[in-house]
Amino acid sequence: MRRGARAAYTDVAILSTTDLHGKCWETDVLTGKKQTHNILRISSAVREIRQEYGAENVMLIDNGDLYQGTQVSEYQILQRLMDRSDQPPVMALCLKEMGYTASVLGNHEFNYPWEVMSETYRWLEEQGVPVLAANVCYDGSLEGTRAGESAFTPYVIQTVSVNGHEHRVGILGLENCDITRWDLPYNYPGLQFVHPGNDSFSMTEEVNLFLPEMRAKGCEFIILSYHGGLGEADTELRFGENSERQALRIIAESHDIDMMINGHDHATGYSNSLIQNADGRMIPVVNGGGEELTQTVFRFSENEEGALTWELLTSANLDPARYPVDEALQALVQPYAQMAEEYVEKPVATAAGEWDGKKDFYTGQTDSMDLIAKACIEMTTLRVSELADEYGKEAVMKEAGTDHLDTDLSISNVAIAGGYTVQAGPISMKDIYRLYSKNNSILVLPMTGAQIRAALEENAAQRLSARVHDGQAFIYTKDELYTNLIFGGLNFTCDLARPMGERIHIQSFSNGRAFEEDATYLAAVSNYLLGNSRCGLRGFSAEDALWSQQEGDDETAQSLIAGYLTMRGTVTPADFGWSWNITWSGPLEDTPLPEDQTGARLVNVPQDGQSVVIFQEPEQVVLTDEVNNDGLAAVPWEASGPALKGPRPKEAVVFTVQAQEDGIYRFLDGEGRYLAAGASGGLTLTGEASGELCSWRLEPAYGGWYVLNVGAKGNQALQRYGSRITTYSFSDGSLFIFNFYQPTGL
């Protein structure tokens, strides 16, 4: 407590982490690379802040997605699942040791079986760390529960002493409502993620169930910790399209929230901003982005009636790399790290023969993705045969609706980490976790030939595009990568020159079975895709599955792959035996636009002083100056050969190129603002030439350029993301491919 000349006040620091994804060790055990953005260093930062403000005046909140992400954080969870350990998961241990005020659930908390995670939450509550998720309630299907009953603590109330008087601060936790799109029911038995009657999945409705109650209990200042993205405030809310990102909507529709902690989108570009609420008040919003600690300091005072008042003093994201490791916490984490390191180094099999090393996983067949598919096909065939041994072959075939029980194909997404590819030589568990980095599980799904074709056709229409110029057809992936489907075990071609709905030609399955529209086949499918509204499997659910991993001893896709490799001993690309490709049968000659229709011409290499627009090739959109979350909005502009068809969209920004001698570029708009990245990502226009954040380098790409920022952390590059262009950690891929076009007078 500090006293001023007229009134006493107390400075309170509100700290938050979000999307840490298991970062609890100094080294990535898969790559050996140093990992300084971890909770060990965050702990030291928290200790310093508590010393500055007093422990009683510091609140520390985690905003979810805590456990999934590293082998050090996940290995113990798997050990508990197999009854090989009774120790708490390491991230839960860190929360307890650091004295977190509250832990809010994230969507990745439901990647794991409920039996393990529910024990973890009980343990945290016993250790004094409340687990918050106000919108998660029972659906009434479990004995002893009723529909709408809270399954977790909705909120906690802290007290702050100001001028000798106690004042109440509430912390309301909100989980993402889209869990049912990503995870399977046995990870959340008897739970639902909005209360009964909330058919629109509005998070504002969920918040308003508790805000009046919190105010009635004396909360004068309320913090909302929401594991969801920023989103938009004024668009129609549709589940599966924008329901996972409702922060702006909640603020715009609410009166009683005084601060918001955000997450899920891993974006720091809008952190420490002020957003207007329903009353016109400006509400501070923070987001640690998965690597940083947010610190927001308020000065709390009392008015003449003794009510709490406040002033926002500072709000900033702190870089953990600037702090030392908390050695005491490191000693507690060390046994977990040692177990994980020993586990991932364990040899499993040998890769023999010639492996292609290709990283274009989306638009061309690759040996690495084929290995995932082969493992899923072979191991699920084995598991279904075990079902037949137990229940009888005829009974299982009747349930499946098939005349066979071997798996015909695999449908997956790309879960490969860091551009990893399989190489000839020993394969360890480390390699398997890099080959398949997500904790997904695999199910066997009966599908008709017509349903398989429909999923392929939708993927071709929604996730693939072709762009012809300079006598070449460039095949791109577009839109959301996580639900871009990769098919294995199926011989087919996709011709993007043909009309939508007629692009797929299926020959047969690699097991020799003929493809027929009205026949039923068995597909090994990732649980992330099953029922996901963003892909062609949205119509299926876990209830449709013939078998799932959770019903057996294998709990994750990695264990399935490890089982296949162990069974094989040696694996070669020749083992896979199917073929697919994406083609363009249309003309390759550029069709020149008449002069009176040409709005801009392709620039091979930007030149100093040249006027250009920045154009994302796969989805044919151009950069504007309109702020959109942590980026700038993009608008469509039709491309034809080496030109863009006029007239130029009025929103499109024309930049003047400033080319430096060292191959570095800057882009200046008509108002004297530079195109700039944030230190941790994002994209903006700034009137200040802020050094390397305004500087860009170009790397040749497939049909264009990769545009990488010089100063931002984590190798950030321009990327199309949703309806905006922002910067994101660079990886080879279509979403990062841009070109420069010089506008004409049209």
Image (cartoon, grey):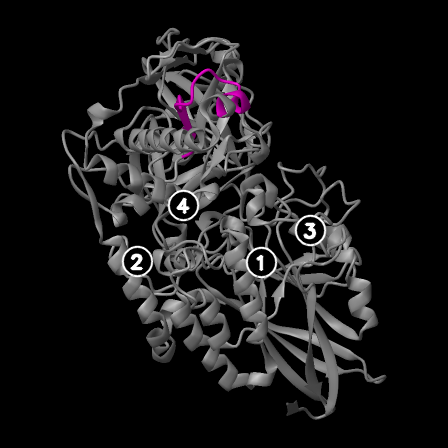
* Residue 317: image tag: none
- What is the number of callouts on the image? 4
User: Which image quadrant is residue 114 in?
Assistant: bottom right
The vertical placement of 670 against 78, above or below, is above
In the rendered structure, are the residues bearing label 4 and label 1 in contact, judged by CB atoms less than 8 Å apart?
no
Quick check: 361 left or right of 113? left
SS state under label 2? loop
* Residue 553: image tag: 4
- Amino acid beneath label 4: Asp
The vertical placement of 535 against 62, above or below, is above
Question: Could you give the CA–CA distance between mark 4 and mark 3, rounded to whole angstroms?
Answer: 25 Å
Is 410 in the magenta? yes
Q: Earlier in the sequence, mark 2 or mark 4?
A: 2
Comparing 669 with 714, the one in front is 714
User: Which image quadrant is residue 90 in?
Assistant: bottom left
Comparing 245 with 743, the one in front is 245
Image point 36% across, 68% down: which residue?
321
Quadrant (top left/top right/bottom left/bottom right) for the N terminus: bottom right
- Amino acid beneath label 2: Asp
Question: Could you give the CA–CA distance between mark 1 and mark 3, rounded to whole angstroms?
Answer: 21 Å
Question: Could you give the CA–CA distance between mark 2 and mark 4, rounded to whole angstroms?
Answer: 27 Å
* Residue 142: image tag: 3
Q: Which residue is mark 1?
A: 105
